[in-house]
């Protein structure tokens, strides 16, 4: 085989795609309860729509600004590529929108 290959430890496969993204460009949505998630890019184009159950995690490739809408703000935590929290759950139930630059 020819061509340049990046070591696998610096890339993370993203479900539903055929591309690899740098790990630093992947965030993880962690369900703390049953919740639906909508991820959109800065132009409002739907990137991902998913129902999650408590304990499930969803990796999301982040290219540029994104908005994350969830059905239950108390049931969602957003983590960076190292597992650090970017957004903790809200104190109230209901639809929440979180934007990442």
Image (cartoon, grey):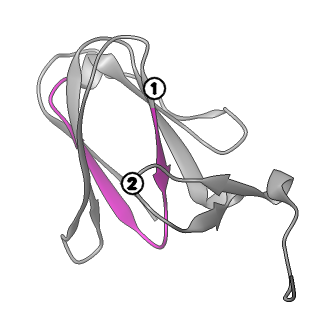
Whichever of labels 1 and 2 marks the residue nearer the N terminus, that label is: 2
Proximity of marks 1 and 2: CB atoms separated by less than 8 Å: no
Q: Residues within 10 Å of mark 1 (few under 14, many from 20)?
A: few
- Residue furthest to the bottom in view is 3
Q: Is residue 45 above or below residue 69?
A: below
Q: Which residue is mark 2?
A: 16
In the image: residue 35, left or right of residue 12: left
Q: Residue at 11% of width from left, 24% of height from top?
A: 94
Residue at 87 percent across and 88 percent down: it is 2
Residue 31 in the image: x percent, y percent?
37, 21
Identified at 67% across, 45% down, the residue is 81
Q: Is residue 70 above or below residue 25?
A: above
SS at badge 1: loop
Picture layout, residue 93 above or below residue 43: above
Residue 27 coordinates in the image, percent (x, y): 54, 47
Magenta residues (range): 58-72
Q: Position of residue 83 (x, y in %)?
A: 67, 32
Q: Is residue 31 left or right of residue 84?
A: left
Give the Cα separation between the discs numbered 1 and 2.
Answer: 26 Å
Q: Which residue is mark 1?
A: 88
Q: Quadrant of the N terminus?
A: bottom right
Residue drawn at x 73%, y 39% as measured from the top left:
82
Relative placement, left or right, of 34 versus 28 is left
Foreground: 5 or 78? 5
């Amino acid at each position: 085989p020819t061509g340049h290959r990046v070591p696998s430890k610096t890339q993370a496969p993203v479900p539903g795609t055929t591309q690899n993204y740098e790990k630093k460009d992947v965030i993880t949505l962690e369900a703390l309860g049953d919740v639906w998630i909508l991820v959109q890019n800065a132009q409002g184009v739907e990137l991902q729509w998913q129902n999650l159950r408590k304990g499930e995690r969803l990796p999301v490739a982040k290219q540029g600004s994104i908005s994350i809408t969830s059905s239950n703000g108390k049931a969602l935590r957003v983590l960076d590529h190292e597992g650090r929290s970017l957004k903790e759950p809200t104190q109230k139930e209901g639809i929440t929108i979180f934007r990442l630059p």
